[in-house]
Image (tube, rainbow, N blue to C red):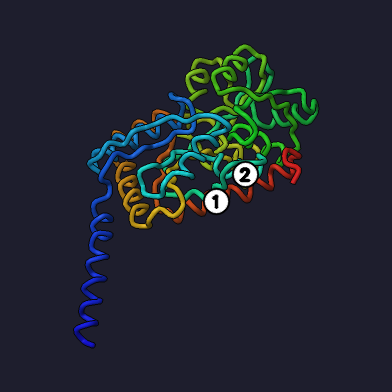
Amino acid sequence: MFCRLLSWLSLIGCLLTPLISMGQAYPIKPIKLIVPAPPGGTADIFARAISRYLQESLGKPVVVEYKPGAATNIGSAYVAKSPPDGYTILMNGLSVAINPVLMENMNYVPSKELTPIIEVAELVNVITVNPALPVHTMKELVQLAKKDAGKLNYGSPGIGSSSFLAAELLAVKTGAKFMHIAYQGFAPIVNDHLSGILQVGFVNLPVALQFIKGGEMRALAVTSTKRSPLLPDVPTVAEALAIPDYELTGWFGLFAPARTPPEIIARLQEETNKALKDPNTIEIIKTAGGEVVGGTTHQFDLHIKRDAERLTEVLKLSGALAK
């Protein structure tokens, strides 16, 4: 009986050894980092910054691939349906939290089919006006938008984008009403804002910064909880309007397919945290207008759930979501 027990224990040990070795060996082949947007955007910049560090620290290539379309759903679904082995990961942002309540018939469920790894960076929007508009403060903008409800227009990359959500949150908090026009990206938005076709902007700060400094856009406030070091003289919306709970910050982070082994998630989280302390990575992210975050997988998961809950409520109150 004792000999049989020893034989069983020996067999179990032999079966477990390859699994343990596989876990220790990760990664043993290149990793694909999927960006669900076209090249050149913020997600791409952040993904390439992280991939450069990870391929050195992990000892294997980390290849950035682009799968844009359907408000990031094509690339995100591709990762969600990939094998949960740590070799296909995703860089995505706020759309992971908000798309499920905005879109019908999605071909994947983010909360069930994606596992958060780590939040990489946050991105601030800046509220601007074309200089031809006689508005110099947030209070003046809100007063005008309430007086002429729906006559002031702005553009966004679409419902669910941080620009759209920033405008809707302002409307809910103040009663200001703006006309929303959807665009295919920020480039045409900026062009129409500079020409005066769009009087108001809710624009990613790195996109707007050069035009603000050149006097072609007038910055009124940033949408974060604290002032941006890139525009230290521009107040937050909370400061400018005495609304302490106004905050809309875009973010980007890494995700893996659900059921990816916890030890692989932990390894990716640990190495990415190291990347986010690297001076070169920090410089790239800050130059792109981002603020480095990092932290734990649990913290990132809580942030996603918090945004999904509060922004769903904002969309309901604004009338943008009939649920």
Would you place residue 5 above or below residue 132 in this image?
below
Would you place residue 300 above or below residue 14 in this image?
above
Q: Which residue is mark 1?
A: 111
Contact (CB < 8 A) between labels 2 and 1?
yes
Q: Amino acid at mark 1?
A: Ser
Of 104 and 247, the residue lying toward us: 104
Q: Can you give x and y, in whole percent of width and height, for residue 240 in the image?
A: 62, 36
Q: Amino acid at mark 2?
A: Pro
Q: Residue furthest bottom?
A: 1
Which quadrant would residue 239 be assigned to in this image? Answer: top right
Give the number of marks.
2
Q: Can you give x and y, in whole percent of width and height, for residue 226 in the image?
A: 51, 41
Q: Residues within 10 Å of mark 1 (few under 14, many from 20)?
A: some
Q: Residues within 10 Å of mark 2 (few under 14, many from 20)?
A: some
**Residue at x 59%, y 22% (from the top left corner):** 184
Would you place residue 73 above or below residue 41 in this image?
below
Q: Can you give x and y, in whole percent of width and height, for residue 213 in the image?
A: 49, 19
